Every structure is written in structure tokens, then in C-alpha cells.
Image (cartoon, helix red, strand yellow):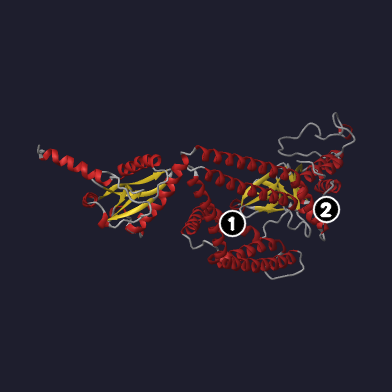
Amino acid sequence: MPLDIRTRMPLAAVALMSAVLVVVVVPPAASQTPAAQEPDARRESVAEALRTAAPAEQVATLYYANRPVLQFRATVLSRTPSERAAAAVSLLDRLVDEVPWGRVGTTTVADAYLINLEGRPVFAILPQDVDLLAGETPASTAAEAAARLQVAFDEAVELRNPSRLLKSALLALAATLVYLAALWLLRRVHRVRAARFSQSAERHIERLPGGAVIFRGSRLPQVARRTFTLLLVLLALLLTDAWLIFVLNRFPYTRPWGESLRTSVLSAVLSGGRLVVDALPGLMAVLVIVLITRFLVRLTTLLFEAMGQGRISIPGVYAETALPTRRIVVALLWLCALIVSYRYIPGSDSDAFKGVSVFVGLIVSLGSTGIMNQIMSGLTITYSRALRLGDFVKVGDVEGTVTHLGTLATKIKTPRREEITIPNTVVVSTATTNYSRHADTEGVFVGTSVSIGYDTPWRQVQALLLLAAERTPGARKEPAPVVRQTALEDFYVQYTLLVCLEQPHLRGPVLTALHANIQDAFNEYGVQIMSPNYEADPTGAKVVPRSRWYAAPATTDVGPREAGAGEKLGAST
């Protein structure tokens, strides 16, 4: 009975799709079959597939036995690449059970290549499946796909062989035991040999000339121990890598991972070695530049150390500026070395290196405004020689000894043993008093004032103040103390006693002792001190008789002279 055209059309499409996957018996020895010997139905189905093939939006990779075989890039007979891959996997699963000895071959039909297993077509490679931009050709793509499929098919057969899997599991277990034993041995060696390695390094160092000094002033034994530990860690990592590769290669499904790991490690080692070899000329140039710079830095250091010690004199360079000048010169030398050696540094021409350089430059530019201000202020302080280490100074309201002159800030230790950090910009913008600058030559005077009524002879007041200065420890005899009449007020005369200190940083304790001695001297001779203000004549003299100088809880063991001496030794104000 004739079929209606609507019936004939679907049947024709089904027949056309089935012809692509028809099983054709081909002798195992034939891997290539000429197109002239193909059945007409296969040629027609392939021709129809070639006519309907179109590039797909999404590419699908055919994976079998955890191995990539081919990427399908074309839609054929309304079948997407993912559907073509799924159909090929389903057919291969059946063929594994039917022909486990099967060999993969290729058959050329028109412009297409059929990948077959024991003569049974598995999938077709069309020109649209070939990535021409990557340099692929249909022939090379078909050959590579056939080779990959053969390996994947053999491993799928092996995966269904219990005896071979059991043997692989036993080998993996044995390798694991050996690996664990090796790790235990490495840990044991580290515990036993690390201390002995460090002790051996200590003995060798002490045998060198000046070895005891080197040993006490360095951390070479610790470095040697850590180096030994690092070597053992690297050995453990190599053992871990070898164990992983061996175990993964024992099983068909994980074998691709083991091969990938082995390839990655070998590639990394070869790439690293090639990079080292390629970088050797540049590294040698950098090494030469560094050695020359180190030589120049050493000469610079020796020169400025000699200037700091006064053995060499260069106009414009003083002993107190020798150290900061040396630092600046050394920094400039290393900066010049970096500029010269930049082009020889491996990877300096890479985009990543340039990007990091630009980023660092941007960060420095954004944060350099305040920093450069502090640095320039520090240079101003240094080269104006306003302050030196150990000077007793007063910066604003802070009084103490300079302990650090930094690039960004100055540190001062107060008589109360407080350390105060002052930014260099504040030091430059504030009046600074240096009590130590002329202390060793002309001497620095410290003054204190008292008010005495007009009924007391000024010569007596002057003598009493000089007597108090003579009794005060820490006050220099030369230059001699000086008394000035600094003001003639309505009801009293203001006298100022100036004494020169032996040690300016003991200014507070010396003034304490001086004030105590002034009170004792004036009380001893019955002269009333009228400070701070005079309102009216008192009914009696406001003096302390000698009999009450040591009223409770005071004792005769500590007088004003002894108190000043005690404070001279470090008591705070």
C-alpha cells in the first residue's frame, strides 16, 4: 500500500539519521576504507549531514573514561553538540561489553571523517567541528580523536576488569605504606639530626678566626637548622608528588589526573630551569652592579666614620652631620644601582612587573606630601645643627634629653623618664632652647629670682644669693655665679641669681637644691623673702629660726646640700 507523503518524510528522516550510526562490519586489519567502497546509504547520510551541519552556539566536549576525546562544534540534523556527545558515550558503553578487544579506526566519507570501533561508526567529524583558527585540519583532528578514543576505550575495558583493579589497589596500598614510612623516617631524621646539624655548624663557626664573636653576634646556627628543615620539607613534597602520581596512574578513571600532575610538575621544573638559564646573564649583571655598589658604600662608610671621629675634615661636613650625610649618600648610591640594574632584572619588561611598579609609584605619590615635609624638616634640623643626640633641650613645653633624631620625628626623654615623640615639622616651627650646646665651653646659666624689701641692704642680699650658689652641688665655680637686680618695684627689689650648671640635663635637681639653700641662707641671717607679692609690713620678721629647720618630719640626716646631691644622681623633679 503506498504511503502518504507526510508518512514518508518522517520515515526518510529516521532512516537518514540511522544510517549515520549503522554498524558496518570491517575487517580489523583495515583502518582506512576508500570512499568508493562505502555503501550508498552511508554516503547519502553523510552527504545530508554535511548539508545540514551548522556552527553551534555552545561547544560540547566528548568525555569518555574521564578523558577528553573531541570537541563537537556543529549542530547536525538538528542534534546539538551535547546530544551528539551523549549519543557517542551511550554507544561506547555498549561496545565496551560487546567488543572489548576493539580497535579504533577512521573512515573518510566525502569531507567527513567517521571514527569507528571494529568497523562500527561511533561519531563523525565534520569540517564545522574543526577549529581552523587554532591551526587544526580535519585529518589531524580525526587522527588525534582516534588515538584518544583508543586510550579511553582500553581504560574503560580495564575499569570493568575486577582482577586488574584488585592488582592496582594492592600496588596503591603498598605505595601508600612505603610513602608513610618515608615520611616517618624524614620526621625521625629531622628530630635527631636537626640539633646535631646546628651543633656541627656552631663548632665550625667557632673554629674560624674570631668565630666566638661571630657566633655570639649572629644567628647562623638557627639559619642552618631552618635550612636543614626546609630541605627535608622539600624532600617530603617531592615524595608526596611521586606517591600521588603513582597511585593515580594505577586506576583508569584517575589516570588522566596522574598524567596531568606529572606533566604539570615536569613542565614547572623545565619552565623554572629555562627561566633560570635565560635569566643568568641579567642576574650576573645585577650581581656585578651590587658588588660595585657595596664597595662604594663601604668606602663611603669608612670616609664618614672618619669624619665623625674627627680624623678627617671636609669643609661643610661636621661631626654631628657625618652620620645623616652618610645615610643620604648610601641611599643615593643604592638608588643609582637600582636604576642601572632595572633593565637586567628578570621580568622587568613584563606587564605584571610594570603594573606593580606603577602601583607602588602611585602609592608613594599619594602619601609623599606629608612624608616629604617631615623628611625636609628633619634635614633642616640636622644640617642647621640645632639639636644633637644627648643634648638637653626645651622644645615648646617639652624639656628633656634628645635620644633620637629621626627622618620623620625627634624623640626626647624628660626628667620624669617619659619618652615624647615630636614630629620634625613641629620642631622646626617651634622655638627650641638648647641647654647643652655651650655647656662644655662658655657654660649655660640658669636663673632664679627672689623679691626682697628696700630695708635690706642689696649687698647683703647679693652675698646671701652667692652663698646659696656656693653651697649648691652641680653649680660650676667657673664661670662664677652672677646676681642681677632685674626690677625695682613699688615695695621690693627683684634679684635674679644666675648659676652655670656642670651638667645641663640635671637642671631640675640643681634648681631644687639651689632654692633650698637660698631659703636656708636667708633664714640663717634673718632676711625675709617677700616673694611673690608684698602687701604690708608684717608685725614680725617672717623667717625660720635655725632651731626649727628640722621640724618634724624632717631629720638632720638630709639637709639641702645632701638633697641636691641625691637629686643629682637621678631623682626627678
* Residue 482 visible from this viewpoint: no
Disc 1 marks which residue?
A: 375
| Label 1: how many Cα within 10 Å (few below 14, some 14–19, many 20+) | some
Residue 441's disc is: none
Tell me if 74 is positioned left or right of 480 in this view: left
| Label 2: how many Cα within 10 Å (few below 14, some 14–19, many 20+) | some
Question: For the point 63% across and 68% down, which residue is it?
Answer: 288
Which residue is at the front of the view, 411 or 208?
Answer: 208
Question: For the point 82% across and 44% down, which residue is it?
Answer: 569
Image spot of residue 95 (x, y percent) = 37, 42
Image spot of residue 218 (x, y percent) = 75, 53
Tell me if 108 is positioned left or right of 433 in this view: left
- Quadrant location of the C terminus in the rendered image: top right
Disc 2 marks which residue?
A: 476
SS state under label 1: helix
Image spot of residue 162 (x, y percent) = 50, 37
* Residue 180 visible from this viewpoint: yes
Residue at the far top: name it.
552
91 to 234, vertically: above or below: above
Question: For the point 81% across and 32% down, which residue is it?
Answer: 540
Mark with earlier residue (1, 2)? 1
